[in-house]
Amino acid sequence: MATTALPQSTYLHDDTPGLWAWIKSWLFTVDHKRIAILYLLSINFFFLLGGLAATVVRIELVTPQGDLMSSDVYNRAFTLHGVIMVFFFLIPVIPSVLGNFLVPLMIGARDLAFPRINLLSWYLYMFGGIFALSAAVLGGVDTGWTFYTPFSSTYSNSNVILTIAGAFIMGFSSIATGLNFIVTIHKMRAPGMTWFRLPLFIWSHYATSLIIVLATPVVGITLLLVAIERIWGVGIFDPALGGDPVLFQHLFWFYSHPAVYIMILPGFGVISELIATFSRKRIFGYEFIAFSSMAIAILGFLVWGHHMFVSSQSVYASLIFSFITMLVAIPSAIKVFNWTATLYKGSISYRTPMLYALGFIGLFVIGGLTGIFLGVVAVDIHVTDTYFVVAHFHYVMVGGTIMAYLGGLHYWWPKMTGRMYNEVWGGISALIVFVGFNMTFFPQFVLGYLGMPRRYHVYPEEFQILHVLSTAGASILAIGFIIPIIYLMGSLIAGKPAGDNPWDATGLEWQTSSPPPTHNFHETPIVTTEAYAYPPEAAELDARSWRPGSPL
């Protein structure tokens, strides 16, 4: 992949004098890299708020009496946690931060296809967040993040309309980003960048973007119908008005199960990059991993009914949805097996991004296997609306997405900032996050199997020890999240210069300066090799003797 020498101007600095001019240069930028940084700051802010809400919930559950909050306040606390974490963190975090920064760089483009729409997507995200935060400040919402009707559309006395408006606006932000990625990947690839030379990170974002564009309008219309019923009393979902509450579940989960893959598919792409780089091997079964992403995107639209096994759904429909749910496990398993095969006889380097990648595989396997349990009708009926579902969801969505996000952030941090971070603290934080996460959520599988329902803050005393263990794990997990904030911010001040390619990785993003110049490449790169074209002898090197920057 040939490129020419590049000037050292970066998106992180601006020559325009004056503080206000500097602020305007960020707020009105159309540089995809700066917009990614704006997303990084704003999404992490919402992650902090969602984490604080989760902290309050876990503190309440230390004792079985419900002595910290009333039932109504508890409902609002876990709803705030769910709404912020799902709509304002898990769905946008990897596409909007890492995807925004890297998609043009990885395909050799100067920017995304529609730079102004890209900036608009960030403003829409912020406007949606303002609505959601306003609802929280004015008393919150008590419906749960799923907004189940007719409670949300008729009977709730909380700020349902404001919260729905926030999620509705956020949906337009996602659609704008998805459309931008699709057009950019189709039309702006560098010469020689064929479909089967694309990095798997690009394949995963392409599949994710298709889901976003096709599914998000459905949930947008659904939430709009809830608002119409709530404001004007039109009978859509409320049986007392002639509506059908199960219709809401069909519409909501038709989006929300594909949304699960909006959260996790970009993480798959990140892990593929990390596994290849830190095992010094071409990814095993490249084509299978690429097509498995597309298969997940397609099958994800066909399994929404497994959320409705106890919602008056026909047993025959449940059996069909159960069967299709098992099929989704196949492309997911393909990825895990191919990553494992890539690691086999590789020159593995246990750097911080690789530790997060290995942690991702561990958490995702547990989450994926328990998902098969939930796809079996008989088992799902037993554990529906228990902590078993909570644990499964968090292992796949939260554990998987966050581990992939942190791994990708550490991997591309030198490219984004031009600075290296403290590797010792990076490894320690990765281990703490992995241990804390398992300690938090694994006891919840046991709680759910024993019959502890979710969304309850008063519970039998025999469940207390498991809740205390879960809360203790959440404390460890919080420490694991705080440590990277400290050393990553410190790296901006005292970090060693990273160089253009500190990992000796392949890919066009590593062929430009760190940080990249405004237009990414001084001249359009020409791609002449496949993705992950590591020399064959690289896999034979002793990982203990290999260091970033050393010749192969």
Image (spheres, helix red, strand yellow):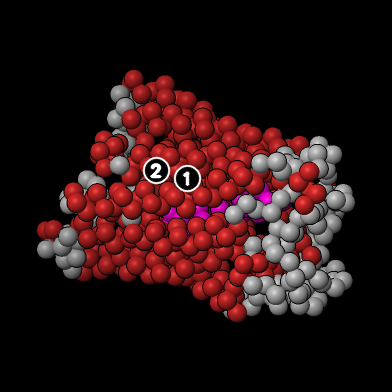
In this rendering, would 199 be left or right of 242? Answer: right
Q: Residues within 10 Å of mark 1 (few under 14, many from 20)?
A: many
Identified by mark 2, the residue type is: Gly
Q: Which residues are magenta?
A: 259-278
Rendered location of residue 17, percent (x, y): 81, 73
Q: Which tag, 2 or 1, sits closer to the chain's start?
A: 2
In this rendering, would 101 be left or right of 56? Answer: right
Instruction: Tell me if label 2 and label 1 are in contact, CB under 8 Å.
Output: yes
Identity of the residue drawn at 84% across and 39% down:
545
Q: Is residue 62 above or below residue 394?
A: above
Return the residue nearer the eye: 347 or 392. Answer: 347
> Circle 1 is placed at which residue position?
396
* Quarter of the N terminus within the rendering: bottom right
> Circle 2 is placed at which residue position?
371
Rendered location of residue 389, percent (x, y): 36, 40
Identified by mark 1, the residue type is: Val
Q: Residues within 10 Å of mark 2 (few under 14, many from 20)?
A: many
Q: Quadrant of residue 98?
A: bottom right
Which mark identifies residue 438? none
Residue 268 magenta: yes
- Numbered label tally: 2
Identity of the residue drawn at 45% across and 25% down:
468
Return the residue nearer the eye: 260 or 39. Answer: 260
